[in-house]
Amino acid sequence: MNTLSGCGFVAIWNDVSRGTEEDFKDWHAHEHMPERLAIPGFLRGTRWGSAQARPRYFTLYTLSGPEIARSSPYLDRLNAPTPWTRRVMNTFRDNSRCVGDFVASLGELPGREVIVCRLHGPVTDGSLFDKIMTVEGVSGCHVGLSDAATSALPTVERQGREVLEPQGLVIISLLPGFDKGAAVTALLPSEAAVVLATMSVELDMKAAQDTV
């Protein structure tokens, strides 16, 4: 796979209560991400993190198509959370989630270091993402738009939790050693996007059926 165009996604931003970070990371690596990647159509799961970001964690699941986010196998998992999932998600703070599809994918795929932006409004500058690609140190720019109806589906997993639903996301791939958060922030309209700090990969897994 050399492009995200046409792929679906599940995007999750979250923090956790102080003192529960290791339980979250253990759960994510040994139960939750493997469980998700066993669902047909889930190709890859990646978590990036930064102590400077608010929230500190961002997870992206890449899907073979946007329809996977409303498939029966995925919804079945969302409606049957394990005891460990219930415990960890009770510690979630500053949680946002959206599902949808990638509508633009320029340059290199997201790698070790990225800038992640939540979209909360339309981006009207049609050349904006080409402009981002001209920033020194930027190697890729990937734009996903939310399917609002699917993002808002009520499930057992999200009961009792406040979960914001962004209109989409922008993931900007960076070359190693470049922190271009300020330069990218200057290009993005503040009324439409929230830019997190530069984040580094913490966990990356591929599904067994994914051969790319």
Image (spheres, grey):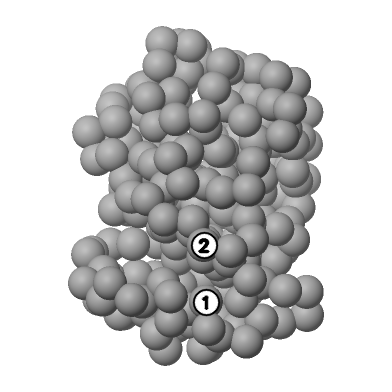
How far across and down, in percent of the image, does residue 187 sit? 39, 85
Position of 139 with respect to 64 (left or right) is: right
The first of marks 2 and 1 along the sequence is 2
Image: 64 above or below 129: above
Helix, strand or loop at label 1? It is helix
Could you tell me which residue is drawn at 50 percent across and 52 percent down?
A: 13
Badge 1: how crowded within 10 Å, few (<14), some, or many (20+)? some
Residue plotted at (47% across, 18% down): 74
Q: Is residue 31 visible?
A: no
Visible in this render: residue 212?
yes
| Nearer to us in this view, 87 or 11 | 11
Q: Are marks 2 and 1 in contact (CB under 8 Å)?
A: yes
**Image quarter of the N terminus:** top right
From the image, tell me which residue sits under label 2.
Answer: 106
Q: Position of residue 212 (x, y in %)?
A: 72, 34
Q: Is residue 31 above or below residue 28?
A: above
204 vs 92, nearest the viewer: 204
What is the C-alpha distance between the residues marked 2 and 1? 8 Å
The image quadrant that residue 147 belongs to is top left
x then y, percent, for residue 56: 60, 61
From the viewer's perspective, is residue 17 above or below residue 154?
below
Q: Which residue is mark 1?
A: 133
Where in the figure is residue 52, as x and y percent of width and height?
63, 74
